Image (tube, grey):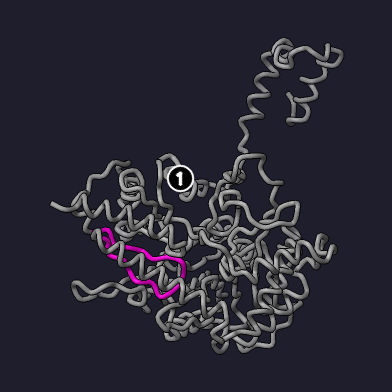
Amino acid sequence: MFRNATAICLHLVGPLRGKKSGASLTRCLHQTLTPCSLCCLQLTMAKRLQARRLDGIDHNPWVEFVKLASEEADVVNLGQGFPDFSPPEFAVEAFQHAVSGDFMLNQYTKAFGYPPLTKILASFFGKLLGQEIDPLKNVLVTVGAYGALFTAFQALVDEGDEVIIVEPFFDCYEPMTLMAGGRPVFVSLKPSPIQKGEPDSSSNWQLDPTELASKFTSRTKAFILNTPNNPLGKVFSREELELVASLCQQHDVVCITDEVYQWLVFDGFQHISIASLPGMWERTLTIGSAGKTFSVTGWKVREDGGMGSPPSTIVGGRGWPGNPERVWLGPQGPPPPPVFLVQVGWVLGPDRLMKHLRTVHQNSIYHCATQCQAAVAQSFEREQLHFGQPSSYFVQFPQYIQRCRDHMIQSLQSVGLRPVIPQASYFLITDISDFKNKMPDLPGAADEPYDRRFVKWMIKNKGLMAIPVSTFVSVPHQKFFDHYIRFCFVKDESTLRAMDQKLKKWKAELMP
């Protein structure tokens, strides 16, 4: 009997040598295979293909709900977290300059980051964190924040390690823990009681200190912090961060903090990086994203060096549409030349942790797009000159987005949805309990959380797309979150007006 697939292939293909070139391979194989070799081939093909670390993580809610929305006419996409307006002009100009300027930017740069970018990141964030950051030892440039997270999990989480994840959480944290061999341990933010008729706020959602402390054990390796939080829009207070810091230090736990929305904070709230607290720099990895920082979640450049083309041709980026194919939706005529997609994220941390991330990086991604790194460096250099001033993009952008947030809140309330007012980020969640009480039996599988059935109903019947919040929690806890859905308000005025029209029609249908 053959011992491996290679031997089988040689056995099967050998008799085909000398056959006419036009002969059907299928017919030749059919004539050649004996019952014994057929049995061997079936046994070989029956071997498990996928790695066990992929078990249970193959379903992607983004693909599912985007597909549903695409099957209906005229659906307003308020589910996915991407701006549908132009990035700041200085960022676009920086990218154009990087593409059309120094020809050496078409080549490799240093594996762990383009030196001007690592230098400005070290300078910019060093002041914010109160640290002397070494660009060579304390900064790693990655392919987006996704790449930074994946690299951190692979570098630090080992088989059987426990990783504490705060619910609701961005949906990649759990599968990344599992792929690294770790065991996710969940602790939930819970809303505090509010007066009837009063709007809820993300600041009301708190961790129970006793419950949180009970999650730390001798097996805990990492604590995943997301502030500002997606999907809730919560900004963790100094007091909350001090509690997390104390527990991490007490149990010798690494904190991986995802801070991609740190520049989008509203209503006078303040973002605080946990790495800036006493004793936390040495055990914290701080992750950021150029896509979220400069509103370029899917940067691209055509072969001719130009910028542009419709958003539907852009692929990739944390939160950008997941369709891996480019589709030209522009004017009649041939499509533009192929686009090259680039993402930039980064990790900041002590060398004792970063050296392990560099090992993963050099043996996987190795290098990020030089031109995009150059553009991000130039954009940060511009912001460093304007930082804290009215001319700063980090001052202007939150003011604009807060108006978008307030617009959406008012519009959603008109049909009986109850938004939880976010302190920050791209998103808000809204309570659909009233609808759950009025129409509890929406179509769907018996075990399907209500919020998922509601979103499918809303896409089909109201022309609005959101994302169910049960997507952002562990399966055992979905029943506690299945009366919330998430909307993205970082949208162009035309998109918000289209939402208004859908909601106006919905409101009219609610009238007796």
Pointer 1 residue: 64
Looking at the rendered structure, the secondary structure element under dot 1 is helix
Of 240 and 41, the residue lying toward us: 240
Residue lying furthest front: 332
Of 505 and 420, the residue lying toward us: 505
Identify whether 57 is placed above or below 493.
above
Residue at 82% from the left image edge and 19% from the top image edge: 14
Position of residue 485 in the picture relative to residue 198 (left or right) = right
> Which quadrant of the structure image shows residue 495?
bottom left
Kindly identify the amino acid type of the residue bearing the numbered disc 1: Glu
> Which quadrant of the structure image shows residue 167?
bottom left
Residue 289: x %, y % from top left: 60, 68
**Residue 422 colored in magenta in the image:** yes
Residue 146: x %, y % from top left: 59, 61
Q: Does residue 357 appear in the picture of this structure? A: no
- Specify the segment rendered in magenta: 417-433
Residue 386: x %, y % from top left: 61, 84
